[in-house]
Structures are given as structure tokens and as C-alpha cells.
Image (cartoon, helix red, strand yellow):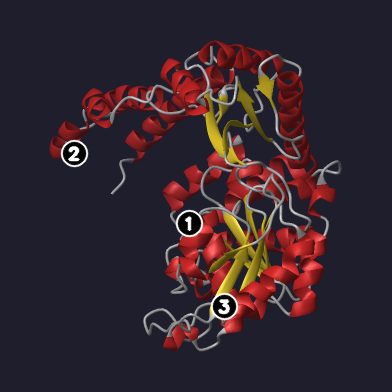
Amino acid sequence: MWNIEEFAGAAHDTVDSLAAYVEESQAGLPPVLTNRPPDELAARLGLDRWIREGGMTGETYRGFLAGYLAAGTRVHHPAHLAHQIAAPFFPAALADFVHGAANNPMALYEMGASAATVEFAVIRWMLEKTGLAGQGGGVLTHGGSLAGLTALLAARAAAAPDAWRAGAPAGELALLAPASAHYSLARSAAILGLGEDAVFELATDPLGRVLPECLPAALERVRRAGRRPMALVAGACATGTGLYDDLRAIGAFCREHGIWYHVDGAHGASALLSERHRHLLDGIETADSVTWDAHKMLGTSSLVAAVLVRRAEDLDRAFRQEASYLFYGEREFDTMGRTVECSKAELGLKVFLNLAWYGERGLGEHVAARYATARRLWELAAARPGFTCPYEPQSNIVCFRYGGPDTDQAAIRARLMAQGDFYLSSAEIAGSRHLRAAVMAPATGDKTLSALLDAVARAGS
């Protein structure tokens, strides 16, 4: 049983600690990351002792929380530029707090009616934004990898209706995707029983964007291999570069040839909310399925991802499972038949509360501002000696190099991380390693961008 007074006291302490943590992170006061080895960090936090002995109190909890937060990575920090993880807005954090106490897993409607109803509303909104409303359907999952797998399960059910019972037809189906597709695509192919050999790479330009004029040749290659296409995947936008494929041209090809068209909008679909950027997603409404992560550009904490389909029944066919202790009686409002997860968190509440606080316009302005900051980084880097930028950014992701052809970009990144002042990632473009910045934090501005380029130049000299 809960000790209500103890909970209330610890909860107040948690809120105070997190508020101070976010405030100092946004101000860029501490390092963006420390990255100590696990053994050292476990000793500092006293993990083994707490696990063996217990006995934590409100006072010792405060000390533990301070050490825990100090040793982590600060996503609200202006120098956090590595990965597409949101600096969460506080309404989404409130949703996590509510779920942590109420714990209404809602894949079965009767276990969380309010949470399920909120998710239904969020899904309807996302279907409307992607142009899939009407006969469309969807569900929220714990992350984009699960969302993509679920979409491909729906595609497999359409291409091979007996696959759930009899298994995927050996060597028969194919996935068409660019090399720039998220790594989880090949993983999904293996999980689905197709194998990685079922993934046929689409021809791209040097920046990894699908070339629509080469799609007929790709289809012919699949057929010559004795396979038939299960799905074709386009990027909106590509994880490495942040560049968008030509969704309309690709969609027209898929429609002409009866191929399931999946748009991976995990990162870039949020640009639908920005008047200045929604043109990048022209043609998304032609997709058979779309994935869209809220924990990237919609400011929710991890993980919330949507699977959206043109025809709701296609998602219902993705799973063909029975369990007498779950599936019986009235099932009209259950979403368990549409997801891998059985106990699914109150994911819709995170998205809903962000929308309720900031509205579509506010979230759209957030997307536009991050895209603008990335463009500013590109402008600053392109104007500096020693820096090269392979493309003009379309999103909040920028890739660049410093130094000559032989300059080790991974070593530059490692030096920056060791210092703890800047956190970048890296990507390979046309066989060349680049530094990669993903602008996620609202606190990131010109001062940080200029300091970053200074630090890169020092680390690369």
C-alpha cells in the first residue's frame, strides 16, 4: 500500500528537482553529458546496496535523484544535437506522472476507458493531418521500430493472407527501400520471417533520396529474383540526412503497380503542422501506411509512435491471434488486436496534453523553429573556412565535415564528447563520414551554433 504522505513529499521533491534540472539544462550551465562507465556510475549511485538492502527514504531519495540526473544526458541543453529525441514539453511529462500513478494500460478498453478514448481522438487527428481520414485507422505504439513493424505486418497480411497461420512464404516476398531507410526496416524483415535478403535497395541520388524514374527497374529486379513486392518504403525524412523523398511520384508508381506504399514519417511527418514546411510531405495522403513519432518533433517524452493506415481493416488483419482470457465478448473498442503490446501505456495522453496546452499552431511553430535553427547552422558552417556541407537542409538535421578528405570526423566527435560540451552524432553520405547535428532543443541558438563550430575546428586541427 502507498504511504500517501511519503508519496506526496517525494513527488514534491521530484518536481522541484526536475524543474531545477531542466532550468539549468536549458541555460547550458552543466556539461551536456558526462558518460561515465557503468561500474563507476553504479558505485556512485550505490545501486548494489539499494538493491540488496532497500530502506530508501525521502532524504536519501533526494540524494540519489540528484546523482542520477547529474550523470545522465541533458536533452534540454542547447548543445544536445546528437539524436532525434525530444526535449519534452512539460505537459507530456505530466502525462508520464499520471500514468505512473494511475497505471491504466488501455489496449483492452475496459482497463483504461479514458486513456483509450484520448488515444482514439489523437489517432483521428493524425489521420486527418496525413490525409488518411475517412476509412483510415491507426494505433499508438511504444516507438517507431514497433510502429514500422506493425505497418509491415499489415502489408504482409495484404500480400500473404495466410502468413500468420502458415508462416511467410519462403523466398517469395520482397521489401523495396533505399539504403537510407531506418535500420529497423531490415530488422523487421528478419522478424517477419522474410529475411534481410528480402530487402531490395532502391536507386538513390548521392544524398540517398529515392529516384522515382528508377523504380520500374527496381520492380523488374524483384521479379527477376522470383519475388513479388510486399511493400515499398519511402523516407519522410531520412534518419541520417533529414531529406525527404518525392512522396507523390513514388506513390503514383505504387498505385499503378498495386504495391503497398509505406511512408516512414517517424521524424518528418510533424512538418505537416508547419505552413512553411508541409509541402515537403506532398503526396503522403497516397500512402497505404504511415508511421509518425511524437517523441521526436511533437515534444513528447519517449516513446510514442503512431501507425496510420488508409484502410482500418488492413490493420485489423495484421494480427490473427486468440487468447480466451482476453479476446471474448465485446471487443469493439479494444486496440490489442492492432499492436504487438498487450499492456500498453497511456501514450495518447502525452500527445493530447501537448496539443491541449500549445495547440496545432504552437507545435507547428516548434517544428518550424527547429528547422530554421538547423538552416542557420548550415549557413554558418558553409560560410566558414574548412567546413563543407553536402546539401541544403530540409529539416532540423544538418550534416557537415571539417578539414580535408583524410580528417577523421569520428575522432572529432569523440573529442567533443570527451569534453562534454557538445553532443553530436555522425552519418555516412556517399561513402564519406560526416558530423551530424539534429536540432531538437528550443534552447539552441546562434551562440551555441557558433561555439559548436569553433569547438569542431579546434578538435579537427
Q: CA distance from mark 2 to mark 3?
A: 55 Å
Provide residue 249's location: percent of width, then percent of height.
82, 63
The residue pinned by badge 1 equals: 345
* Amino acid type shown at disc 1: Ala
Closer mark to the observer between disc 1 and disc 3? 3
Which residue appears farthest toward the left when viewing the image? 53
Vertical position of residue 309 compared to residue 39: above or below = below
Query: In the rendering, which numbered label is found on residue 177?
Result: none
Marks 1 and 2, the one that precedes in the sequence = 2
In the drawing, does residue 181 fall left or right of residue 287? left
Q: Residue at x 72, y 63 (%)?
A: 124
Q: Quadrant of residue 215?
A: bottom right
SS class of the residue under badge 2? Answer: helix
Marks 2 and 3, the one that precedes in the sequence = 2
Q: Residue at x 79, y 56 (%)?
A: 246
Q: CA distance from mark 1 to mark 2?
A: 26 Å
Marks 1 and 3, the one that precedes in the sequence = 3
Provide residue 297's location: percent of width, then percent of height.
66, 42
The residue pinned by badge 3 equals: 225
222 and 154: which is toward the camera: 222
Determine if residue 128 is in view: no
Query: In the rendering, which numbered label is found on residue 51?
Result: 2
Provide residue 193's location: percent of width, then percent of height.
43, 74
* Amino acid type shown at disc 2: Ile
